[in-house]
Amino acid sequence: MTDFDSIWRILDEIRTVVNAVLGECIWNLAYDEKRRAIVLELTIFLDEDAISNLCCQFPIPADYDGVGSRGTKFVFYL
């Protein structure tokens, strides 16, 4: 069974980090049940240094997931 309370808490923490580091630039932030992961897509494209810096700030491990239709994508496996 999925613990949605924990997922919502993690979503809030991710949103807080992105807003603090980059400003409001989230295009999509949602839980993907098929992947059992949280997916984040920004409205901007980041270079490698910015990606690395942002990944270090998240409360759970983040993986670079490539370039989406709007910007840089990250995935957080739970």
Image: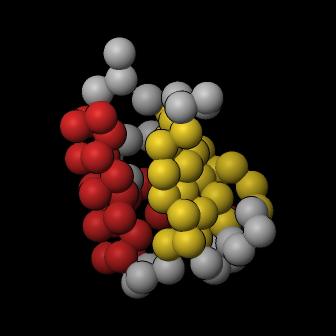
Would residue 45 be seen by someone viewing this image from the given angle? yes
Residue 66 locus on image (x, y percent)? 74, 55
Q: In this picture, is 57 found above or below 61? A: below
Side (left or right) of 41 relative to 70: left
Residue 7: quarter of image = top left
Residue 5 in percent (x, y) is at 22, 37
Q: Position of residue 49 (x, y in %)?
A: 61, 68
Q: Is residue 1 above or below residue 60?
A: above
Tell me what residue is drawn at x 28 percent, y 57 percent: 12
Q: Does residue 70 lie above or below 36 as drawn?
A: below
Residue plotted at (35% across, 15% down): 1
Q: Is residue 50 visible?
A: no
Q: Nearer the viewer, residue 71 or 52?
A: 71
Residue at 55% in and 49% down: 39
Question: For residue 40, what is the image quadrant?
Answer: bottom right
Q: Is residue 45 left or right of residue 27?
A: right
Relative image position of residue 6 (x, y in whole percent): 25, 36
Q: On screen, 6 above or below 28?
A: above
Direction top: furthest residue: 1
